[in-house]
Image (cartoon, rainbow, N blue to C red):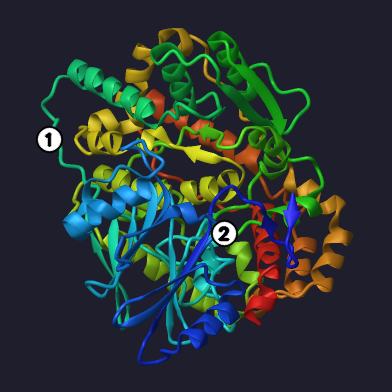
């Protein structure tokens, strides 16, 4: 892995872009605008483009993303791809559609994208996001200019303060939710939105909304299964690249397994390379990796087990800090991704299918909106009581108030949704898929190989909005559809255990002295809220409480589940207490990320 002078990873297969729009009444000299961009961003603009109100500068690592009309009046940048039409000239196609229809052209786009439009004819600057934010754009105001980028490292951050609420979201709930980032004034633009630049910033309006319309409540189950199976097959077919080498991130659950089955038994794809991450040289026979290998062998695909974590906690911390996100939990698989990178890069343009889906999360008995949030693991600070000792008292009060307000806002947006199970599935898409699952795919795996999520296709999402509640509970319709469609694959018993369990408490105990040395030898803007000494005190004061407590939590969950099944009921979502080692690993990875931005921000 290559690093730049600040220790950030370079050589990503994921293109990067940065756009600045500075009001002309603030600065109108082209050379001065160029200098302002370079000083703030640390790179030279690759394209100049101005409207009557704004001087615009654009930097991109891939000029093929950019299309400009013949009169050089309108520029359009497409970060990502459309699933239709299949063409190497998709930016040009989008530009023609925009010139014909205006922003309305985005309503029917099916793809994974961020689109930036700079229109000198209409004096418009806008950013369009896809339905689920499978790719994201960050927006901020810096030195009288508006900035948009697809990565935080590219954003001008000098003088920007950390947002303690964003930091707390990350540590308590593994990801930063509710459009926040780690930095004050830098936000994630809304999914499924057209964000038009106004003097006060980007004004967002939705072009599509995920709802539960119950239009299929009276449709026969057999008809629903048949239609859903066709939709799933077509979603994989539509996103299948016919000119690329294909990988599959395979687990033994229902999602990636269904992708494998559709590729092999429905679409007759003969050559797919599967990989599964493990943390043991001897994975369990009934574990995820061995079951995945059995499925791949049945399909005639190659399969590779890859150690996700190699056992050096200091390397793991540093590597997790080298990815430009800070939005989601540190990756347990980072060492394995580095090992796979040579395979991925052997053929340029390789792609990896994933099983990311919109079918929901394990179901619980819901009695309140608080239950809904807890069922999606969007907890309040009470789930991590040990964290209170890390923050100073004033900041902790701010954190508690801020997370409480954010959680209330998340559900208040959907006051018209009365059924709690509808609300849960809506928020699964709106929050958990959006802010927890997809950033990990974009900023970790997506840095090494282009990722494809076929079950987030528009047709799949549209179908799920029609499905009755009873068919959504515990993903009933989906599981029955794929097992009936792919009986040879699902005849293999699902995995009884996962493969990525690591005793983080033991890891920290073994390397405690080196971690202390690392903490006191590096400065970080996180020190404002969480000092190195408070991290050391936290580490020394409780790691004997085997922070993962994973075995205990899993045992309790199995007992509650068994009791509920005997009673024919479902359990309410548990308020899981976050273990100390899990808090510590998130804090250290976050601090490492911020170490690599420190000279940008101090």
Find the distance from the CA under tag 1 to the CA under tag 2.
Answer: 39 Å
The label nearer to you, 1 versus 2, is 2
Element at badge 1? loop
- Could you tell which of marks 1 and 2 lies nearer the N-terminus? 1
Kindly identify the residue that appears in the image at 63 percent across and 79 percent down: 601
The image position of residue 425, as x and y in percent, is 31, 43
Q: Which residue is mark 2?
A: 325
The image position of residue 421, as x and y in percent, is 27, 42
The image position of residue 219, as x and y in percent, is 13, 24
Are the residues at dot 1 and dot 2 in contact (C-beta closer than 8 Å)?
Answer: no
Q: Is residue 14 above or below residue 75?
A: above
Residue extending furthest toward the front:
70
**256 or 267: which is nearer to us?**
267
Q: Is residue 449 above or below residue 192?
A: above
Kindly identify the residue that appears in the image at 66 percent across and 63 percent down: 593
Is the C terminus in the top left, top right, bottom left or bottom right quadrant? bottom right
- Residue 368 seen in the figure: no
Classify residue 369 by image quadrant. Answer: bottom left
**232 or 492: which is nearer to us?**
232
Q: Is residue 201 above or below residue 169?
A: below
The image position of residue 290, as x and y in percent, is 64, 18
Kindly identify the residue that appears in the image at 56 percent across and 53 percent down: 577
Q: Which residue is mark 1?
A: 215
**16 or 58: which is nearer to us?**
58
Disc 1 residue crowd, few under 14, some 14–19, many 20+, Cα 10 Å: few
């Amino acid at each position: 892995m290559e690093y730049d002078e600040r220790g950030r990873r370079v050589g990503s297969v994921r293109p990067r872009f940065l756009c600045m729009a500075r009001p002309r009444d603030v600065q109108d000299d082209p050379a001065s605008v160029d200098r302002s961009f370079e000083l703030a961003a640390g790179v030279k603009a690759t394209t100049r483009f101005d409207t009557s109100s704004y001087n615009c500068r654009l930097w991109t690592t891939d000029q093929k993303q950019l299309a400009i009309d013949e009169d050089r009046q309108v520029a359009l940048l497409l970060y990502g791809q459309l699933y239709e039409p299949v063409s190497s000239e998709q930016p040009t196609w989008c530009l023609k559609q925009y010139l014909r229809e205006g922003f309305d052209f985005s309503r029917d786009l099916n793809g994974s994208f961020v689109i930036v439009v700079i229109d000198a004819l209409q004096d418009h600057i806008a950013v369009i996001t896809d339905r689920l934010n499978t790719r994201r754009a960050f927006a901020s105001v810096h030195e009288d200019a508006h900035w948009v980028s697809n990565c935080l490292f590219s954003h001008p951050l000098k003088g920007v303060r950390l947002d303690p609420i964003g930091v707390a979201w990350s540590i308590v709930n593994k990801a930063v939710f509710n459009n926040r980032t780690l930095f004050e004034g830098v936000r994630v633009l809304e999914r499924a939105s057209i964000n038009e630049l106004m003097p006060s910033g980007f004004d967002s309006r939705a072009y599509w909304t995920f709802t539960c319309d119950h239009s299929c409540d009276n449709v026969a189950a057999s008809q629903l299964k048949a239609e859903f199976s066709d939709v799933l097959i077509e979603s994989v077919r539509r996103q299948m690249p016919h000119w690329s080498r294909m990988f599959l991130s395979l687990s033994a659950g229902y999602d990636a397994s269904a992708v494998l089955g559709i590729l092999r038994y429905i679409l007759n794809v003969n050559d797919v390379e599967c990989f599964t991450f493990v943390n043991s040289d001897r994975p369990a026979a009934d574990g995820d990796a061995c079951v995945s290998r059995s499925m791949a062998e049945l399909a005639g695909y190659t399969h590779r087990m890859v150690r996700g974590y190699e056992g050096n906690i200091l390397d793991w911390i540093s590597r997790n800090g080298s990815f430009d996100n800070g939005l989601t939990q540190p990756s347990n698989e980072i060492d394995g991704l580095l090992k796979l990178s040579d395979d991925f890069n052997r053929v340029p343009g390789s792609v990896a299918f994933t099983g990311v889906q919109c079918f929901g999360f394990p179901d619980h008995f819901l009695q309140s909106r608080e239950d809904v949030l807890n069922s999606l693991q969007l907890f309040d600070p009470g789930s991590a009581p040990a964290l209170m000792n890390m923050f100073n008292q004033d900041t902790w009060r701010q954190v508690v108030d801020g997370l409480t307000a954010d959680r209330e806002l998340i559900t208040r947006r959907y006051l018209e949704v009365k059924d709690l199970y509808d609300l849960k599935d809506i928020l699964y898409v709106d929050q958990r898929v959006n802010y927890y699952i997809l950033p990990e795919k974009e900023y970790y795996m997506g840095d090494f190989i282009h990722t494809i999520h076929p079950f987030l296709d528009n047709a799949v999402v549209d179908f799920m909005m029609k499905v009755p509640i009873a068919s959504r509970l515990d993903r009933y319709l989906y599981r029955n559809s794929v097992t009936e469609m792919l009986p040879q694959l699902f005849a293999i018993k699902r995995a009884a255990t996962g493969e990525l369990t690591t005793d983080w408490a033991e890891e920290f105990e073994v390397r405690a002295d080196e971690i202390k040395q690392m903490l006191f030898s590096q400065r970080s803007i996180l020190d404002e809220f969480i000092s190195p000494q408070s991290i050391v005190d936290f580490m020394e004061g409780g790691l004997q409480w085997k922070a993962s407590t994973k075995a205990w939590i899993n045992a309790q969950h199995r007992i509650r589940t068994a009791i509920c099944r005997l009673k024919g009921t479902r359990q309410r979502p548990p308020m899981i207490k976050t273990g100390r080692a899990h808090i510590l690993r998130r804090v250290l990875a976050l601090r490492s990320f911020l170490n690599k931005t420190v000279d940008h921000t101090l």
